[in-house]
Image (cartoon, grey):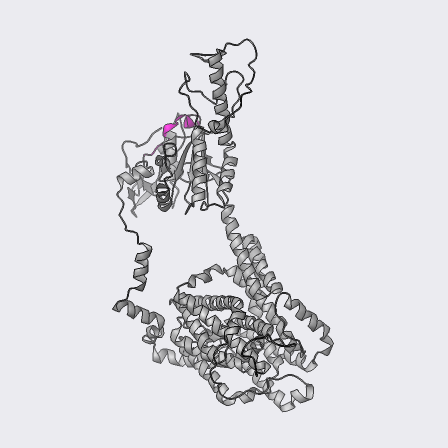
């Protein structure tokens, strides 16, 4: 019975130990009643798993089969069809609650601000993809329109993402390099170099969209959970380094071919250093001015964001100024700087993807699909928690999949979300994706009407804008000291992912980081921190005996905790740690005992030994030589058999004829299975072997806090037999300890500084009177 009342102070008077001179209940009240401490009282019988199951009837639950799940998944009715429609078109859900008067103005302001940033970032990030700048405007328009209808996040700004653009750029430059002929791809005939690159980027984007859509339909959005925050942080930091290096050629005004593959960053830096004397001073000055001004104003925006109605759009302002100055002073002809150049008006006709490119880029498209979704979902989750609404990972996959498929048909490249652009949309008051739609309209106006005004814009300005927006990703390096102090395996994952992505490229680096991350998880589970527990005096709490001073350990009892599942990879580690804690090998002890029994039988048969009331008596006058007979190892592994002996042998006493057997001081072993969530067949066999070895040397084993699923699996796999019985399973650790002390009262009699083991439970009322919950103690030793 568990009694919980606000008027009562609880006190548990359960003690382990013995005392010859004072009352255990009084000591408990003195030790347990602390001023202001909450207490609780439990009075119940001692339970094993079997006795608990007999006394408390379980609810029968019919388990669904795979066929039942399959039928339910494909069943269709009116309610299910309605929910499916609402799920596939989330706009139906939030448009019904749209507050026109309160939200529309905020969404318009936010949409205009975000649209201006999206135009600039579309042009800038397009350089990362090694494409003509105006194609970035397509990526800032088409995916946004589709996401407006299909997305579940109300605050992220969909469009180009620098890491994704860089990954696309590596594929583009591999298939259509700056120097040398392109790969032999069907469909490249008659196309210019830029047209070939656009075909590659749009085909890869189409394939990325297919992969994301397939994952969304198959409901596998959980795959993003395998990308931990640590891995994503290390990966994006490496991507920021790649982006920084890729933009140096624009900032310095150098002609550097785009490279891809392992160590491409090293080779790119080598080329830049070799050409450093050809730096365009005008590009460097422009870039430095943009970097300093934009950085300072962004810091002002961050510091005074609570006081500013909207962040100062410094990138847009500096871009307009740079365009005007470049046009007025004709920077292109006078200083030879590279500008954006011709921007065609309007949109191009749709284009089918190239199937041979699918075959060539399938391996690289998959990490793009994962990274694009993972980043967008992470940002969306942050804003959903902040503004109290839910997002659906599988629907997000569908939304991005359809967005990329649709956008690729109109020559845009893969979309995700940029952190800075989403921050602008949310911080300027955006309430829904109406702000995103308005930002797409701003991009469309630039594309259709005023794009020509950006033609004199120096590319060094775009490069500087890209670099200054890398601050948040580059500053993630500061996480390394924190991770090293708090969690060294996570720090190793961060460093391994970052270094691998920097040296091997983003695709291989992501795969390497994921491998290291999964390896770290496997190693943590394969080599868990097993511990020996002890009772905290005056409580039913058991903790690692190395961590506490005031503990109680009955003689001959050991409590061993396994803090992980048991499976084929760690069952041997579990066995070795258990034997290390016990201090002996039960199989070796068993063999020694069986050898000793065999020798005693032989000596009795020869008359060299006789049994008396005081034990065995050596009747031989000389030393007894060891037998040279061959030993059958299989027989030595069998349980000890005393049936033809006059009495059982006390193995811890002195044995006759100078027979020596390892001493075993432990009579009871408790295995705490509270953290064991599953066992596989290999672990099940290994566990049973260990249990049999211990039982055969008269060490009783008890397993406590076993998960019902694990216990049911043991029954289903015929784990139990005449030696390993289900009665060894107890409900809690304390139940097992009380049972052991009841069977072995001598374990407490050696301890003279404690009260008796009393399960009488008392309740202290506020008025000060005491009453016993149990007039007759249920268990008293």
Comparing 276 with 475, the one in front is 276
Q: Is residue 115 visible?
A: yes
The stretch of residues the image draws in magenta is 742-760
Task: Please check the rendered image and state whether residue 749 is part of the magenta-colored stretch, yes or no.
Answer: yes
Q: Quadrant of residue 695?
A: top left
Q: Residue at x 47, y 74 (%)?
A: 206
Return the x and y of residue 608 as percentages of the image width and height.
50, 11
The quadrant of the rendering that contains the C terminus is top left
Query: Would residue 539 be visible to someone looking at this image?
Result: no
Residue 168 lies, with reference to residue 46, above or below; the image says: below
Magenta span: helix, strand or loop, mainly? loop
Q: Residue at x 51, y 42 (%)?
A: 573
Inspect the magenta stretch and tell me whether residue 329 lies in it. no
Which residue is rendered at x = 46% and y = 39% of the image?
686
- Residue 96 is situated, as x and y percent measured from the top left of the image, at 31, 75
Position of the N terminus by quadrant: top left
Residue 748 lies, in percent from the top left, at 41, 28
């Amino acid at each position: 019975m568990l009694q919980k009342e606000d008027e009562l102070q609880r006190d548990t008077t359960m003690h382990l130990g013995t005392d010859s001179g004072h009352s255990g209940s009084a000591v408990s009240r003195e030790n347990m009643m602390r001023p202001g401490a909450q207490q609780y009282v439990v009075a119940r019988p001692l339970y094993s798993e079997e006795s608990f199951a007999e006394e408390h009837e379980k609810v029968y639950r019919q388990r669904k089969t795979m066929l039942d799940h399959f039928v339910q998944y494909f069943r269709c009715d009116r309610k299910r069809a309605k929910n499916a429609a609402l799920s596939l078109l989330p706009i139906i859900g939030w448009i019904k609650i749209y507050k026109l008067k309160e939200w529309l103005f905020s969404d318009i302001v936010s949409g205009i601000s975000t649209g201006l940033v999206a135009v600039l970032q579309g042009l800038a990030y397009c350089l990362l993809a090694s494409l003509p700048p105006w194609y970035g405007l397509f990526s800032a328009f088409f995916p946004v329109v589709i996401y407006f209808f299909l997305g579940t996040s109300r605050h992220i700004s969909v469009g180009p993402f620098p890491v994704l653009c860089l990954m696309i750029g590596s594929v583009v430059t591999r298939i259509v390099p700056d120097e040398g002929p392109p790969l032999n791809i069907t469909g490249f005939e008659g196309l210019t170099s830029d047209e070939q690159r656009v075909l590659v980027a749009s085909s890869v984007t189409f394939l990325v969209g297919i992969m994301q859509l397939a994952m969304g339909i198959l409901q596998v959005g959980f795959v993003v959970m395998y990308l931990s925050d640590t891995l994503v942080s290390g990966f994006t930091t490496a991507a920021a380094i790649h982006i920084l290096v890729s933009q140096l050629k624009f900032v310095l005004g150098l002609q550097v071919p785009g490279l891809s593959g392992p160590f491409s960053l090293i080779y790119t830096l080598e080329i830049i250093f070799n050409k450093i004397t050809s730096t365009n001073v005008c590009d460097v000055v422009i870039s430095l001015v943009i970097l300093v001004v934009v950085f300072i104003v962004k810091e002002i925006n961050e510091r005074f964001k609570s006081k500013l109605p909207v962040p100062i759009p410094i990138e847009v302002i500096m871009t307009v100024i740079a365009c005007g100055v470049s046009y007025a002073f004709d920077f292109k002809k006078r200083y030879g700087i590279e500008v954006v150049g011709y921007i065609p008006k309007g949109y191009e006709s749709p284009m089918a993807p190239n199937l041979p490119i699918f075959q060539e880029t399938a391996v690289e498209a998959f990490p793009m699909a994962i990274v694009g979704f993972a980043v967008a979902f992470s940002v969306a989750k942050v804003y959903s928690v902040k503004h109290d609404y839910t997002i659906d990972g599988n629907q997000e996959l569908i939304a991005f999949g359809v967005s990329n498929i649709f956008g690729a048909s109109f020559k845009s490249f893969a979309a995700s979300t940029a952190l800075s652009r989403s921050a602008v949309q949310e911080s300027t008051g955006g309430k829904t994706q109406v702000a995103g739609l308005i930002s797409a309209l701003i991009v469309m106006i630039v594309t259709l009407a005023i794009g020509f005004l950006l033609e004199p814009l120096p590319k060094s300005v775009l490069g500087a804008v890209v670099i200054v927006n890398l601050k948040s990703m580059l500053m993630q390096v500061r996480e390394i000291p924190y991770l090293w102090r708090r969690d060294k395996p996570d720090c190793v994952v961060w460093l391994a992912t970052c270094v691998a992505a920097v040296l091997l490229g983003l695709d291989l680096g992501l795969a390497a980081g994921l491998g290291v991350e999964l390896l770290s998880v496997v190693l943590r589970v394969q080599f868990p921190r097993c511990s020996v527990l002890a009772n905290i005096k005056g409580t039913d709490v058991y903790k690692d005996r190395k961590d506490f001073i005031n503990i109680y350990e009955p003689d001959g009892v050991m409590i061993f905790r396994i803090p992980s599942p048991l499976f084929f990879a760690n069952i041997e580690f579990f066995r070795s740690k258990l034997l290390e804690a016990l201090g002996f090998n039960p199989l070796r002890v068993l063999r020694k005992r069986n050898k000793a029994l065999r020798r005693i039988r032989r000596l009795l048969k020869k008359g060299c030994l006789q049994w008396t009331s005081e034990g065995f008596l050596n009747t031989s006058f000389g030393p007894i030589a060891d037998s040279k007979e061959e030993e059958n190892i299989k027989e030595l592994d069998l349980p000890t058999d005393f049936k033809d002996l006059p009495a059982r042998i006390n193995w811890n006493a002195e044995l006759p004829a100078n027979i020596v057997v390892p001493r075993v001081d432990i009579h009871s072993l408790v295995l705490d299975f509270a953290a064991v969530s599953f066992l596989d067949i290999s672990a099940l066999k290994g566990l049973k072997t260990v249990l049999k070895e211990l039982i055969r040397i008269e060490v009783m084993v008890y397993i406590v806090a076993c998960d019902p699923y694990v216990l049911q699996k043991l029954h289903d796999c015929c784990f139990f037999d005449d030696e390993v019985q289900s009665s060894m399973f107890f409900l809690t650790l304390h139940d097992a300890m009380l049972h052991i002390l009841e069977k072995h009262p001598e374990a407490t009699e050696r301890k003279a500084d404690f009260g008796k083991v009393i399960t009488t439970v008392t309740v202290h009322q506020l008025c000060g009177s005491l009453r016993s919950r149990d007039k007759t103690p249920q268990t008293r030793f």
